[in-house]
Amino acid sequence: MSFLWPELLWLLLLLPLLVALYLWLQRRRRKMVVRYSGLAMVREALGHGASWRRHLPPALMLLGIGVLLLAVARPTTTVMLPSQQRQVILAMDVSGSMRAEDVEPNRMAAAQAAARDFISAQPPSTRIGVVTFAGTAALVQPPTYNKEDVLAAIERFNFQRATAVGSGILVALQAIFPDIDVDLSALDPRPGAATRRHGRALGSGEPRPAAPPEPVEPGSYKSAAIILLTDGQTTTGPDPIAAARMAAERGVRVFTVGVGTDNGELLFGDGWSMRVSLDEEALRTIADLTGGEYFYAGTAHELKKIYEGLNSKLTLEKRETEITALLAGAAAVLMLLAAGLSMLWFNRLA
């Protein structure tokens, strides 16, 4: 717990003074009882059972005052509240390695099933978009409230060659901020990339932004998030780490999901074979840079659980919240309880 006005915490020093005043009054009352024998006889007749009753209302009143003094300092704490999340982009790997059957029935089918459950669990207020990436990336379903359209887009996946994780991140970022003009070739480490651009030619006279946007704190943009799923390593396209930095500068979190078993899968084709391995280090780095998290799924059940966990992370979030009103209400309840018990047992307020 922290306080917006910590300088007012000195008021808590009043509590020991009030306790000392109460003890002094009790000592004074005992002297008066001893002085008048009739009162002493009444006290003895009441027995020890009435003693704790006599002290309980003042104790509750002192506790209420203490809580009220804490409230004056405007305390804050971290609590779980409904998220402001309004948009989720699913960026999914559709490269040929997703045919691997080390995750039953295969990686693609398991990913589609988990995505369908995730989509169905989203509240109506959340827009969902779908990006697919292999050698290139494409926005196959712009963000929409219509879950049927999103589910249909999931079903239309087709396998393609190569893996461009960086392109997937950038196209997902463009889906969140349509006015962003992302130059993919600037992040592409391949020779000759300066003469190409993802879907458009460079040097065509198109207007460019006058200046890049002012960077914000990573993970601070709570209105949208990207969930990126892949089973391999980047083989083409922009550097995924550089793409992640662009997302981080705009405050967008990227949650990464790695699919596959530890040893990967050996795939065969027409005269070729390859072993598919997962670049977990890159996925962890992407998540860390953007304020997201990395998850590993070795089975279809684990993948489903990951998406269930992501659903709760995106619908609830930790927020620093002022709880002054809560403490003030608690103090009022304690004081009313003290007054009520005093009236019930002694027919007086003190």
Image (cartoon, grey):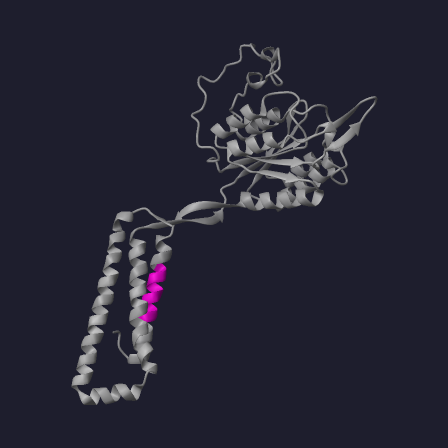
Q: Is 332 colored magenta in this rendering?
A: yes
> In this view of the protein, which residue sits in the foreground, 36 or 120?
36
Question: Exactly how many numbered labels are in the figure?
Answer: 0
Residue beneath the point at 47% across and 46% down: 318
Looking at this view, name the residue that lies furthest to the front.
263
Q: In the rendered view, does 8 fall on the left or right side of 241?
A: left
Q: Position of residue 2 (x, y in %)?
A: 36, 48
Q: In the rendered view, does 287 fall on the left or right side of 65?
A: right
Residue 159 visible in the shown view: no
The region drawn magenta spans: 329-339
Q: Position of residue 71 (x, y in %)?
A: 32, 55
Question: 170 above or below 191?
Answer: below
Q: Is 327 colored magenta in this rendering?
A: no
- Indicate the quadrant containing the C terminus: top left, top right, bottom left or bottom right: bottom left
Main SS of the magenta part reads: helix
| Rendering quarter of residue 20 | bottom left
Residue beneath the point at 73% across and 25% down: 160
Q: Position of residue 313 (x, y in %)?
A: 55, 44
